[in-house]
Image (cartoon, helix red, strand yellow):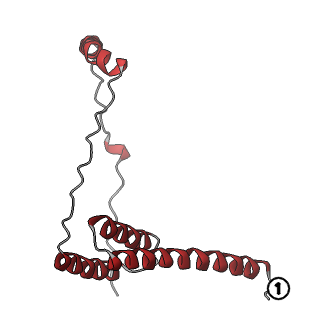
Amino acid sequence: MPIIKSAIKRAKQTIKRRERNVGIKHDIKTALKAFNAKPTAETLSAVHSEIDTAVKKNLIKKNTAARRKSQLAKVAKEAGVKLAVAKKPVAKAPVTKAAVAKPAAKPIAKKAATAKVAAKPAAKPVAKTAAKKAPAKKPTAKK
């Protein structure tokens, strides 16, 4: 057993991660067995979902997941499984009272702001003097 505090913590984290990873892999295997027993669109979708979850949690690599999903699609095609395309409902943005009232108020505020800007006098330009310039360096003689 580790003695150092950080090593003890690391050992606990490793145990938790391993349990989580084994659980996710078990879910993939269970879904895959269900698909192999009865290839349907629902079981295929379940396997794809489990594989995507494993990729998201960095349990398997992206290309490994793509390869497995490709092989599953090939088996599904041979079994004559038709994939059902699910359409996502389009969510409309909620209309608020503030959003409706703002367009009418803005043009009036802009006119008032431009009138104030035009009334301000122009700033006087600052003249540069020759005294502020740095003197030129003298050339040094080479020996």
Residue drawn at 23 percent across, 80 percent down: 75
Q: Position of residue 15 (x, y in %)?
A: 66, 79
Total numbered circles: 1
Query: In this view of the protein, which residue sits in the foreground, 114 or 100?
Result: 100
**Vertical placement of residue 39 versus 114, above or below:** below
Q: Is residue 41 above or below residue 67?
A: above
Residue found at x 17% / y 80%: 78
**Residue 106, quarter of picture:** top left
* Spot occupied by residue 1 in the image (x, y as percentages of width and height): 80, 89
Residue at the outermost front position: 38
Q: Amino acid at mark 1?
A: Ile
Q: Circle 1 sits on which residue?
A: 3
Task: Residue at 74%, 78% (x, y): give it.
Answer: 6
Note whether 128 is above or below 70 in the view shown.
Answer: above
Looking at the image, which residue is at 78% across and 87% down?
Answer: 2
Instruction: Write down the quadrant of residue 117 in the picture.
Output: top left
**Is 138 located above or below residue 13 in the figure?**
above
Q: Residue 113: in sight, yes or no?
A: no
> Residue reaching furthest right?
3
Mark 1 surroundings within 10 Å by alpha-carbon count, few (fewer than 14), some (14 through 19), many (20 or more): few
